[in-house]
Image: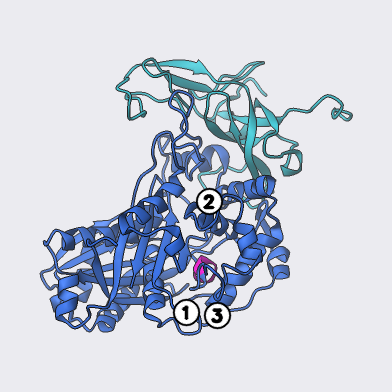
Chain colours: A cyan, B blue
Amino acid sequence: MTTTATPAIDGWFTTGPEPALLGSRCTACTTVYFPPAAGFCRNPACAGEQFERVELSRRGTVWSYTDAQYQPPAPYVPATDPYVPFALAAVELPEGLTVLGQVAEGYGVADLRVGAEVELVVETLCADETGERTIWRWKPVVEMGEEADQ
Amino acid sequence: MSARQVAVLGVGMHPWGKWGKPFVEYGVHAARAALADAGVAWTDVDLVVGGETVRNGYGGYVAGATFAQALGWNGARVATSYAACATGAQALDTARARILAGLSEVALVVGADTTPKGFLAPNAGERWDDPDWLRFRLLGMTNPAYFALYARRRMDLFGATSEDFAQVKVKNARHGLANPYARYRKEVSVADVLGSAVVSDPLHLLDICATSDGAAAVLVTSTEYAARHGLADSVRIAGISTVTPTFPNTVMDMPNLSTDSSLATGEPERTFKASIGHAAYEEAGVGPADVDVAEVYDLSTALELDWIEDLALCGPGEAEKLLRAGETTIGGRIPVNPSGGLACFGEAVPAQALAQVCELTWQLRGQAEGRQVEGARVGITANQGLFGHGSSVVLTR
């Protein structure tokens, strides 16, 4: 990551050595939202209007996964020319929600299975006029004994 | 069965394809076909409901009034519906509601689309608060990628195989061979599907439906009007479900980047898709065991298998068994997508839910030449689209 790297979207995740998604928690019913919610709690049984910012768990389990073998259309901004396919995963977090993300660079669908553990990392999504833009990604957690080539 | 029914007197379609003409032409073609099928004059229609789509590339957006003007202003009331893939069913529900309220008697419901090439993509412009824009910008998450997530879960959880998914395409391609409105009328083999390019693992190009131009129209009336015209035994709409999800919606839905959290509230009784069919059954007063034929939204081959379970036509994880035994083929226990489905049509969003109703009407009348489900009396449709929209329609005879 270069010094010009900035998150591709403000206020959705932290950077640094232990990055995390930033959710919001309703102070009345404790329901957690990601992307962060504001205004009114969407739990129909809750009248809450106050939220506190919370970091979501950095580890979760794979709900499902796939990849994008063709370049997605705009507003996707390709990181490379020619296009290089990437994997995607939906990950269940201990907070009771599932969050989509690209899979960390160097990993593909062969490295994933439903129920496998993954960890959040922050990597470069693309570059624009302001420099590199970063995004959260899911990285497979390598079990002990499987890291021979790490 | 419910007494709150309306009669389907006429149905009509414009063939699906990539014709490149204005959507109004297709819509008028389908509308006139439905009127002719019913033997009802356009001047008798007192309500027009148009299905709308929200996408750039049109020389104007679709609205009920667009079709009413093209057919020749006749003073009818007008309404326009948008509900993503469920648009046609929501339009039909609007027509039904006014008829059952006694406010209208003869309603023409029309959906038509002219689609762009390639992946469906959001409208131009930067919209940092729009999940449909953000999913492309931040993740490169296309529609097929969502379908692929569902497909992969079937493989990892239920042992589905790529061959199973291909077999859905083989079946639907065969079903659609004799359908004059289908865009693709050609036998497809398992090898063809597996040999086509992988778009989003595990789905191949031939597992995923195309986008098409097309139009469908349905003429619905009060049962009294039908009886007065000697059509008391016409096909009836017994139920229309357009329910929204119940919080928390815990299944990843297009175009969202996340699900609701169930931690504070617990899981809902049913998933969104299961609740769509459940509400239609409840309203119609029939159950899954009564269903003779189903038209479900096979945006992907694997999604057809999900729908069979969501409509409770079999238990969770059992759809592959049904498929392998030939039970979902015409002649089997519960034929699914006898029209050929989206596999043979490609998706024309605002017309598609109405096309499902057209097909079931022909099936229940015994007019589905070359693809007839013998003796069909009860049919159900199902689909789901963006932003919490979905629908299911139960037709009976």
Cα–Cα gap, marks 1 and 2 = 35 Å
**Which residue is depicted at the point 65% across and 74% down?**
B188
Q: Chain of mark 2?
A: B
Query: Same chain, marks 3 and 1?
Result: yes
User: Label 3 sits on what residue type?
Assistant: Leu
Q: Is residue B148 visible?
A: yes
Instruction: Give the SS element for disc 3.
Output: loop
Cα–Cα gap, marks 3 and 1 = 17 Å
**Which residue is depicted at the point 51% across and 67% down?**
B336
Query: Same chain, marks 3 and 2?
Result: yes
Magenta highlight range: B341-345
Instruction: Give the SS element for disc 2.
Output: helix
* Disc 2 crowd, CA 10 A, few/some/many (<14, 14-19, 20+): some
Measured from the top left, where is residue B220 in percent x and y? 24, 70
Q: Which label was assigned to residue B143?
A: 2
Residue at image mark 1: B374
**Which residue is depicted at the point 46% across and 61% down?**
B289
Measured from the top left, where is residue A124 in percent x and y? 64, 31
* Disc 3 crowd, CA 10 A, few/some/many (<14, 14-19, 20+): some
Instruction: Give the SS element for disc 1.
Output: loop
The correct choice, above or below, for B25 with respect to B117 in the image is below
Instruction: Assign the magenta stretch its main secondary structure.
Output: helix
Left or right, B296 with reference to B22: right
